[in-house]
Amino acid sequence: MTRARRLRRVLGAHGCTLLALVVFAAMTGVPARAPLALPGAGGLPLAWLFNLLAWIGPGLVVAGVALRLRAGLGAGPGRIAGIALNLLLLAALAFAAQGLLPLDVQELDAGASRWHALAWMVWNLAFAAGALLAGLALPSVRVPSLGLCAVVTLGLLSPGVFGGGIGERVVLACWWLWTLALAWRLPRQR
């Protein structure tokens, strides 16, 4: 798979997430600082469509690109690079799982919402660890990977740094940038 093709797939996936977030927030009247996943909460109109467009579909597309990147890595970059791309795959699957495990609008801090929070946390941790290892093992993405890892880690360790509702938006933007950097900067599949 060529770099341009990988980049188009990842851009399309992220564009789908962004469009779903904007359109469904406007349709449902969700406040600007509300959790990003709120339009997909159980019981809300068209929640299944939001979850499909915002989380499930894009997560699976990025997972497919991660598999291709891992397969095309070869033996040169080493084991750490392979682990980094496996963490990219895990993060992409956890991203998709957020749509399969929607929030419960009646209990945002309990019940089914805890499963969504778990998927969100796995996505964050796999993303941060993958970015760190990619930064250490893959010179072509060293600067963006380590920089984005630092931002995500800061947000995880000090949630108040970005303020209420901003932190998850910063992490999502970092996710988009990192996956785009990997899709574009890693060599073509052998």
Image (cartoon, rainbow, N blue to C red):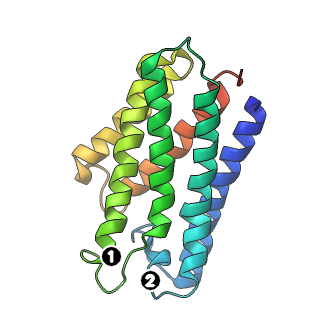
Is disc 1 placed on a helix, strand or loop?
helix
Residue at image coords 70%, 52%: 12
Quadrant for residue 183, please give it: top right
Q: Is residue 174 in sight in this rendering? A: no
Q: Residue 187 location in percent, x, y?
A: 67, 21
Q: Is residue 108 above or below residue 144?
A: below
Q: Residues within 10 Å of mark 2 (few under 14, many from 20)?
A: some
Number of disc labels: 2
Q: Earlier in the sequence, mark 1 or mark 2?
A: 2
Residue that protrudes farthest toward the top in the picture: 76
Q: Residue 58 location in percent, x, y?
A: 61, 56
Task: Locate the N terminus by quadrant.
Answer: top right
Is disc 2 placed on a helix, strand or loop?
loop
Which of 122 and 142 lies nearest the eye of the viewer?
A: 122
Quadrant for residue 130, please give it: top left
Given the image, on which type of amino acid does mark 1 rest?
Answer: Ala
- Residue 112 has which mark? 1
Q: Is residue 9 left or right of residue 21?
A: right
Q: Is residue 49 above or below residue 64?
A: below
- Residue 120 has which mark? none
Given the image, on which type of amino acid does mark 2 rest?
Answer: Gly
Task: Kindly report the distance in space between the C-alpha atoms of the residues bearing marks 1 and 2.
Answer: 9 Å
Q: Is residue 31 in sight in this rendering? A: yes
Which of 172 and 72 lies nearest the eye of the viewer?
A: 72
Q: Is residue 26 left or right of residue 88?
A: right
Q: Residue 10 location in percent, x, y?
A: 66, 45
Residue placed under numbered mark 2 in the picture: 42
Task: Locate the C terminus by quadrant.
Answer: top right
Q: Are marks 1 and 2 in contact (CB under 8 Å)?
A: yes
Residue at image coords 41%, 18%: 136
Q: Is residue 93 above or below residue 22?
A: above
Residue at image coords 59%, 69%: 52
